[in-house]
Amino acid sequence: MSDNYIAHVRKDLDDSWATPHSLSDHLKMTAKMAGKFAGKFNSEEWGKVVSC
């Protein structure tokens, strides 16, 4: 997946834009977190299925 897609971006307190969070990084980290949570009931790989 290209890093040209943006998952989200926020505005800082000084009204400037923060560095955008790339979609590919966002999906990888979300899958990692989902795997961690699903691991509590022995389903870590199912939780990470998004990253495939």
Image: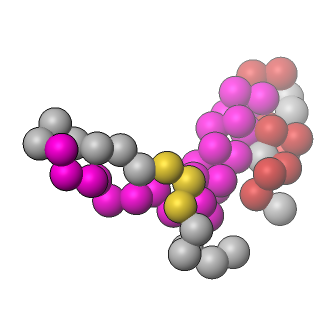
The residue positioned 85% from the left and 29% from the top of the image is 42
Asked if residue 24 lies in the magenta stretch, the reply is yes
Is the residue 3 above or below the residue 12 in the image?
below
Report whether residue 4 is seen: yes
Left or right for 14, reference 5: left
Report whether residue 32 is seen: no
**Quarter location, residue 4:** bottom right
Is the residue 4 above or below the residue 45 in the image?
below
- Of residue 47 and residue 2, the one placed in the foreground of this image is 2
Quarter holding the N terminus?
bottom right
The residue positioned 40% from the left and 58% from the top of the image is 20
Left or right for 11, reference 45: left
Asked if residue 9 lies in the magenta stretch, the reply is no
Specify the segment rendered in magenta. Answer: 15-39
The residue positioned 32% from the left and 59% from the top of the image is 19
- Of residue 8 and residue 40, the one placed in the foreground of this image is 8
Picture coordinates of residue 24, whole percent (x, y): 61, 64
Left or right for 10, reference 14: right
- Of residue 10 and residue 51, the one placed in the foreground of this image is 10
